[in-house]
Image (cartoon, coloured by chain):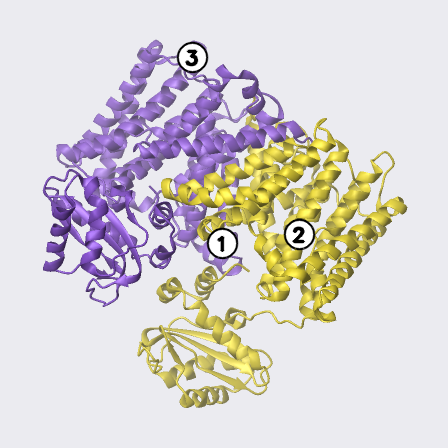
Chain colours: A yellow, B purple
């Protein structure tokens, strides 16, 4: 059997390690600036690819990311697998029933949100092909259909993430956007299948065959197969080791479905996406199984795939400003107005409709994946590819902030956002309530720029009105202070415990002092709720007394909070 | 960039899907017969490889598992990654401190358990090379050192699994075996590094360089690097999204370490094993992060790798009985007597010493991995490879049962082992205690071959002595019956609940009837304890009333139990 040689293995492992580390690092940095992680992940590829490393140290780049030979093929196999698994996870997030539940509005948004940008894109590419990077020799119809699809497809995982971050995932508006995006995605992939068929990717399979097999497969994956899976899963869980049985079943089902759609001439990811939809539909797929797949794929495979995008082309050399602006303009205009119109037709007021428009406009992941395939099949050139990646990134970046601005939303605030190293007291010296308040005020007042005596007095006054021990070893003395511009939180830990007159009579081991501005009504309640939620987790309560220092405290608290 | 073509991608995905499905299925079947899963996983490869599919449908085999070209290289890259990740998990299971805690005995067992089989193996290969498959033209010293290493290395993951299954992982004997096996593994890998150096795998790197780099790397990975990691992890958890930051860090660290050891001329898996040891050492690596890596690797990557072993050679054509028996004989004799002697020198009685001997004798995974590498480097031929795989499997199969027999251990019994479809009542009709006992006796008595009236009377008599409601909505009426040969369990669910006079006054929703043989003292207590433990999990208690039928009940209960 032909195998990789010693130096190819060395290069492959090193390349994967470095790419993963850089992608995760820059992904985290992106999040820090409230940008989607995918931006940093692609940037990691740009750094290691022809754009930067290729320009600075071409020999290193050729060693780490060879463009030919066993190393290149193995790397390609891995990134193909990565994107197949990523689409599995994206599919698992789809909840088909929401499409129907939100009814009329969702259908309107889905239809006009797809049709308007699709028609706009198709029209521009058809009548002004030069403007959109069309090259003679390429199938014009396929090109126009492809560009129209890219300009009208949404990025379900990104949209879901944005809505969750804004805390409106379960709201009526959120469900409408998600339902419309699902419909959008399914339709977009079907059109893309037609495009691939037109290009004859199916190795001689007749387009007619490709089409009816695609429809039959899609129909089966949305109806009978979820039904069968729902009946098989309990049997697997009952008769195999847990969670190995379900994990193995889910992944091999996904791989075989992917192989099938690849075989019929549309891409493998279409199969794994629908496999994900079929699997995710069953309530018997337990949360822990989902989480295991989701975490491994989202944090290992997805970063590797998106970083590999940055490796593909030179983003500086092939950047064409006019082309990029044209594509971006069509994408944003078409998607936002189309979806907003759908909202209006569905009977929503203008503000909500516009919010839905921007919610639907994120074209991140899906647009990029389509771009990679199109580049691979020679449908588009490198200039268009770079423009599509930039368009996908910009629309994803714009969506969240615009939604927030239009709907006047506020991000939920976490108490750790207002906690600093200086206001964390690992071992409180005071042993009784009023002294503890003073000790914590002492470290917080300088940060607030307010006299310690004023802080202490305000918190004590509030404490006297009603004690702030809330049980479970937690106390939350607090006060609103005039002159304060932003909330401040201090944490003190006490091993012996301090009596804060809690309803369960237990002494408080964790004391959180909360200071908020006088005029900020929501801040205090939000921070209080966040603290209570955090320490409701038993593991955190049990372990908090063992932390050594501020960093370990943060690490513990973060591990109990949902991803952000 | 060179990429896989359409038909290569189709074949690769289909091959991975089929291989994974078969490997998991046969792995589960193996467990069902109390055999290690690795046996079934290798068998899956034998089915899809030259041995079976190659003989029945050579064209299909050539399509699915091509021996040349892009598909073969991509598959090789994937299995290389799989084994690197599997060794990461194996390394993470190592707890260095146990080596020192068990002190004298462990050291004796580690030393003689390594030296005796190593010397025996080396001597036989050196003085009777023909007996052990040595072929002229191969470096004789390297061959002798390699065979000696294979014959003296343990399989830490398998041993740990066997000890856990027997419930003696945390016992003194268990810790001794584990500590000795760790020492054994580290030493074995070092010797193997020397062998690879002798073969000049390092692409011209001088053996001296390979050796001192190996020692320096090992020393660093066991001392300073775990120290650094222990300090870095809390920072990562505090400042990155959870668990993505830690997952990304662990995997990229592992990949870079693997690339390093591959580069210095020993195999990549040595680096990832030590990376696992260094990572696993830190108590800051949270259980959930471990679990995510462990589950994905153990249930996806490991089965794929072990199945790929079966693909490599024709196990029927290259099976040499004499060679296999010779190798098996040396392996078992050397390892068991060597380790048992160590136990005696350490002051243990003969019975325990022999138990330790068989505990150490499982050579499964590690022996096979070494065999794959040796085959790849042309050190051994296919006959020897097949013999090594068979030896590794047989020693792993023998170890558990022998340990159990020598130490007179019993496997802990689960109540689900004695529960049948017929004795599961989804909706109890009876509404009061004595009638419920009758209703459950009615379905159980036929299975026991005992008259219903006798069963009902016995259980009611016991119930009258002392009520069996044990709180949390659970009741466990039970009786010992003369004439019964094996325990029997019946489960009845009651939505309205039945008063079983529980200490917490709550009505019982889950009623477990337990019948045990008169002379089997332990059975009743063990089953009772298992039921109580199972329903202590709140998720199971909350969901049990929603199950529809026996299979869903089993699925629910299994998902709350540890892997088996």
Q: Nearer the viewer, mark 3 or mark 1?
A: 3
Q: Are marks 3 and 1 in contact (CB under 8 Å)?
A: no
Q: Are marks 1 and 2 in contact (CB under 8 Å)?
A: no
Vertical placement of residue B547 versus A129, above or below: below
Q: Nearer the viewer, residue A429 or B26?
A: B26
- In this image, B183 relative to B275: left or right? left
The quarter of the displayed image where residue B368 is located? top left
Residue A256 image point, x, y percent: 55, 34
Does label 1 lie on the same chain as label 3?
yes
Label 3 packing within 10 angstroms: few (<14), some (14-19), many (20+): few
Label 1 packing within 10 angstroms: few (<14), some (14-19), many (20+): many
Which residue, given by chain and number where applicable, does mark 1 sit on?
B243
Vertical placement of residue B141 versus A358, above or below: above
At numbered mark 3, what does the secondary structure look like: helix, strand or loop? loop
Which residue, given by chain and number where applicable, does mark 3 sit on?
B317
Vertical placement of residue B199 versus A24, above or below: above
Which residue, given by chain and number where applicable, does mark 2 sit on?
A183
Q: Is residue B145 visible?
A: no
Label 2 marks which chain's residue?
Answer: A
Residue at 58% from the left image edge and 35% from the top image edge: A12
The quarter of the displayed image where residue A469 is located? bottom left
Label 1 marks which chain's residue?
Answer: B
At numbered mark 1, what does the secondary structure look like: helix, strand or loop? loop
Q: Are marks 2 and 3 in contact (CB under 8 Å)?
A: no
Q: Nearer the viewer, mark 1 or mark 2?
A: 2
């Amino acid at each position: 059997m032909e195998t990789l040689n010693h130096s190819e293995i060395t290069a492959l492992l090193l390349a994967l390690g470095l790419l993963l580390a850089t992608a995760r690092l820059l992904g985290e940095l992106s999040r820090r600036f409230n940008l989607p992680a995918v931006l940093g992940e692609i940037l990691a590829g740009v750094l290691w690819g022809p754009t930067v490393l290729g320009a600075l140290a071409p020999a290193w780049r050729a060693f780490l990311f060879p463009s030919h030979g066993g190393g290149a093929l193995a790397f390609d196999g891995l990134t193909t697998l990565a994107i197949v698994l990523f689409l599995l996870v994206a599919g698992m997030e789809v909840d088909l029933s929401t499409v129907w539940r939100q009814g009329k509005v969702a259908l309107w948004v889905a239809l006009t949100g797809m049709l308007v940008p699709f028609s706009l894109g198709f029209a521009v590419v058809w009548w002004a092909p030069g403007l959109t990077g069309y090259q003679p020799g390429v199938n014009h119809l396929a090109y126009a259909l492809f560009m129209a699809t890219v300009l009208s497809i949404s990025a379900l995982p990104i949209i879901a993430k944005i809505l969750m971050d804004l805390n409106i995932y379960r709201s009526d508006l959120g469900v409408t956007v998600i339902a419309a995006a699902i419909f959008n995605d399914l339709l977009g992939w079907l059109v893309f299948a037609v495009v691939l068929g037109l290009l004859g990717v199916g190795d001689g399979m007749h387009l007619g065959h490709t089409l009816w097999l695609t429809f039959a497969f899609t129909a089966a994956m949305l109806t009978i197969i979820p039904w069968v899976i729902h009946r098989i899963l309990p049997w697997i869980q009952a008769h195999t080791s847990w969670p190995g049985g379900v994990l193995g079943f889910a992944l091999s089902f996904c791989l075989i479905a992917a192989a099938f759609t690849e075989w019929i001439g549309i891409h493998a990811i279409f199969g794994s996406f629908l496999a994900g939809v079929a699997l995710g539909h069953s309530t018997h797929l337990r949360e822990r199984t989902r989480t295991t797949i989701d975490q491994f794929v989202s944090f290992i495979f997805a970063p590797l795939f998106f970083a590999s995008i940055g490796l593909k082309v030179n983003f500086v050399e092939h950047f064409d400003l006019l082309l990029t602006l044209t594509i971006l303009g069509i994408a944003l205009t078409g998607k936002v107005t189309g979806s907003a119109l759908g909202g209006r037709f569905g009977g929503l007021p203008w503000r909500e409709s516009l919010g839905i428009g921007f919610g639907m406009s994120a074209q991140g992941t899906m647009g990029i994946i389509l771009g990679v395939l199109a580049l691979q099949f020679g449908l588009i050139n490198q200039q268009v590819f770079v423009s599509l990646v930039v368009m996908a990134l910009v629309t994803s970046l714009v969506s969240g902030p615009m939604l927030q601005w239009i709907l006047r939303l506020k991000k939920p605030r976490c108490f750790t956002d207002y906690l600093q190293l200086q206001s964390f007291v690992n071992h409180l010296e005071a042993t009784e309530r009023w002294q503890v308040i003073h000790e914590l005020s002492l470290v917080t007042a300088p940060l607030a720029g307010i006299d310690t005596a004023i802080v202490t007095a305000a918190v004590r006054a509030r404490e006297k009105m009603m004690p702030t021990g809330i049980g479970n070893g937690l106390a939350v003395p607090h006060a609103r202070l005039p002159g304060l511009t932003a909330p401040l939180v201090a944490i003190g830990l006490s091993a012996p415990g301090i009596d804060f007159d809690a309803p369960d009579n237990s002494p408080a081991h964790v004391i959180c002092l909360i200071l908020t501005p006088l005029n900020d009504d929501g801040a205090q309640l939000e921070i209080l709720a966040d603290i209570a939620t955090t320490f409701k987790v038993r593991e955190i309560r049990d372990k908090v007394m063992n932390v050594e220092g501020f960093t370990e405290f943060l690490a513990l608290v973060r591990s109990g909070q949902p991803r952000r």
